[in-house]
Image: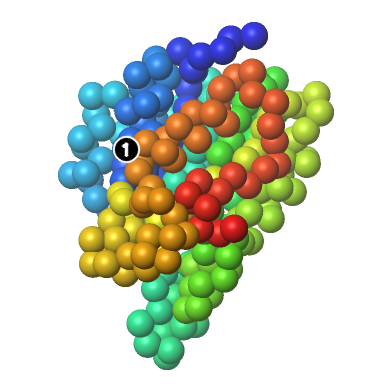
Amino acid sequence: MQETLNGLEIVLAGGSGGLGSATARLLADEGARLVVSYHSNAARAAQLQDCATVLRADLTRAEDRTRLLNAAPNLYGLVVLSGDPSRVKDPLEFDTVARHAQEVNYLGPIQLAREAAARMRSAGTPGSIVLFSTMQAVSLFPGSTAYAAAKASLQHAARVLAKECRGKDNIRVNVIAPGATAAGMAEASIASGKYNHLIDQNLIPRFGRAIDIARAVRFFLQPDNYITGQVLSVDGGVTL
Ligand SMILES: NC(=O)c1ccc[n+]([C@@H]2O[C@H](COP(=O)([O-])OP(=O)(O)OC[C@H]3O[C@@H](n4cnc5c(N)ncnc54)[C@H](OP(=O)(O)O)[C@@H]3O)[C@@H](O)[C@H]2O)c1
């Protein structure tokens, strides 16, 4: 069985962000053929045009999910990095923010994953799907209901999908739960000192780097990997 990603077609949904762009570079260096999607920041996504086909896709829209997968007709891998921090600044906003969080952080990603799995199954491809959760869905962070509950739903649904795809289909479905990583949506919070207490209280040795996450993605994508249905915390130990 092939051991590297050379020549394999992989979709990185939301791959234009801080964690996604580091992942795209690592996979491209190994020869993977990449399709990367973004949602609203076209300029950031354009920086990956030298190593990937880049297109816009809103994962909350069924037609966008289908169009994204159509761009990879020989799909081997799907990594869903799309996400929104869904911060609730005013309690009166909770209903609106929480519903949007469900769409972006849970329903869109799991529906894309399910459609990808169906395509892999009908093509007879033993593929790999990686979804993105968060430390906030593993441990309890006050104030994180909208974001964390949606990500916890995603973790559970991913494991159900893994069970549906095990055996002779051999489509593996796993989840990565990053901790405070100095890239993408946590970059500004880390720069502001919001997470300094994690280091001051000796809970983590340092903040995560995007490459820590990219390496975990690559591990799950490796064609001869034997792991499915797992949630891997890449968080320096903060959720222990
Ligand atoms: N960075 C961290 O420390 C950290 C910690 C825990 C979990 N995570 C998770 O890791 C994943 C990647 O995060 P990141 O830090 O790389 O964040 P990021 O830089 O904000 O990237 C998020 C990506 O999602 C896309 N996106 C947003 N809304 C979307 C929608 N409706 N449909 C499709 N795509 C959409 C963004 O596109 P545009 O930029 O074009 O809008 C971007 O490509 C997320 O799922 C996040 O929850 C990150």
Dividing the image into 4 quarters, which one contains the C terminus? bottom right
Would you place residue 50 above or below residue 99 in this image?
Answer: above
Q: Secondary structure at mark 1?
A: helix
Q: Horizontal placement of 71 versus 75: left or right?
A: left
Q: Horizontal placement of 238 versus 39: left or right?
A: right
Quickly name the residue at label 1.
21
Front one among 147 and 97: 147
The outermost residue toward the top is: 1
- Residue 225 visible in the snapshot: yes
Would you place residue 47 above or below residue 239 in this image?
Answer: above
Tally the numbered discs.
1
Whole-percent x, y for residue 130 in the image: 56, 39
Q: Residue 152 appears in which quarter of the rendering?
A: bottom right
Whole-percent x, y for residue 5 in the image: 49, 17
Dividing the image into 4 quarters, which one contains the N terminus? top right
- Ligand 1 within 8 angstroms of badge 1 C-beta: yes
Residue at position x 43%, y 60% from top? Answer: 202
Residue at position x 70%, y 41% from top? Answer: 229
Residue at position x 32%, y 42% from top? Answer: 16
Whole-percent x, y for residue 27 in the image: 40, 24
**Tag 1: amino acid:** Ser
Would you place residue 11 above or below residue 93 in this image?
Answer: above
